[in-house]
Amino acid sequence: DFKKIFDKQRFDEALQLSQPLAKEFEQRLRHEQKTQKQSKKRSGKADSTRIHQTQQGNSNVFQRRSDPNEKDYAAVVIHDRSGSMTNHGSQLIEPSEKATTAMVAALEEVGVDVAVFSLYDTSVVLEKDFAEELDDAKERIVHGSTNGKTPLSDAVALARERLKEQGTHPF
């Protein structure tokens, strides 16, 4: 079980770091949702780069603009809490928790549903589910506990399955 000593200062610092990251994510989402030109269509505006293919019987020589699609996005963050995060007096867990928190806050800011899994004591632990707000899960994410090995393949398989269940587009 985690030691569960919430570090409010680290959490607040991470929220400050999340602002520029949220702006970057917002730009990427806006780009993803722009009107796209689709080619190789059977109808629409003639694509001058493909019109010559009609001589070979290809009728997919048109292009159309697609409307931006409003997609629901989801992401899974996998956080390493294995014993190596505090080996030899090195406190790697503190910047790792800060980075995880900043990323989750930034993704939530732009409307991406986020789950957080940690690798702790040879297990994959759910620290934040998609439906939860970061503020409700903060004590499970920012507490400094480490132990065990790194079951990364288990975490990736679980993350992939949870994203499928969520029914959204991975971000």
Image: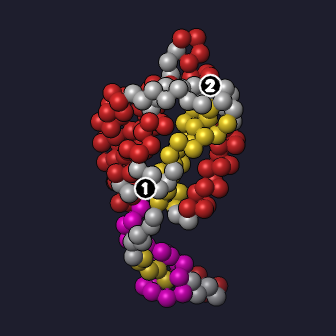
Task: Identify the element where label 2 is drawn.
Answer: loop
Q: Nearer the viewer, residue 127 or 15?
A: 127
Secondary element at tag 1: loop
Residue 17 seen in the figure: no
Q: Which residues are magenta?
A: 32-50
Quadrant hosting residue 154: top right
* Residue 1 % position (x, y): 60, 31
| Residue 119, quarter of the rendered image | top right
Residue 60 horizontal/vertical position (percent): 57, 83
Residue nearest the observer in this picture, 45 or 38: 38
Residue found 42% across the figure and 71% down from its top: 69
Residue visible at 63% across and 53% down in the picture: 160
The question of residue 35 being in magenta is answered with yes
Residue 111 seen: yes
Q: Is residue 65 left or right of residue 57?
A: left
The disc placed on residue 112 is: 1
User: Gap between marks 1 and 2, in whole Å?
Assistant: 30 Å
Q: At 42% from the left edge and 39% from the top edge, which residue is drawn? A: 138
The correct choice, above or below, for 14 with respect to 60 in the image is above
In the image, 54: left or right of 99?
right
Q: Does 107 sit above or below residue 139?
A: below
Q: Which amino acid, by three-letter code, is at mark 1?
A: Val
Closer to us: 99 or 82: 82
Disc 2 target residue: 147
Kind of residue at disc 2: Asn
**From what the image shows, is residue 118 above or below residue 48?**
above
Which tag, 1 or 2, sits closer to the chain's start?
1
Q: Residue furthest top?
A: 88
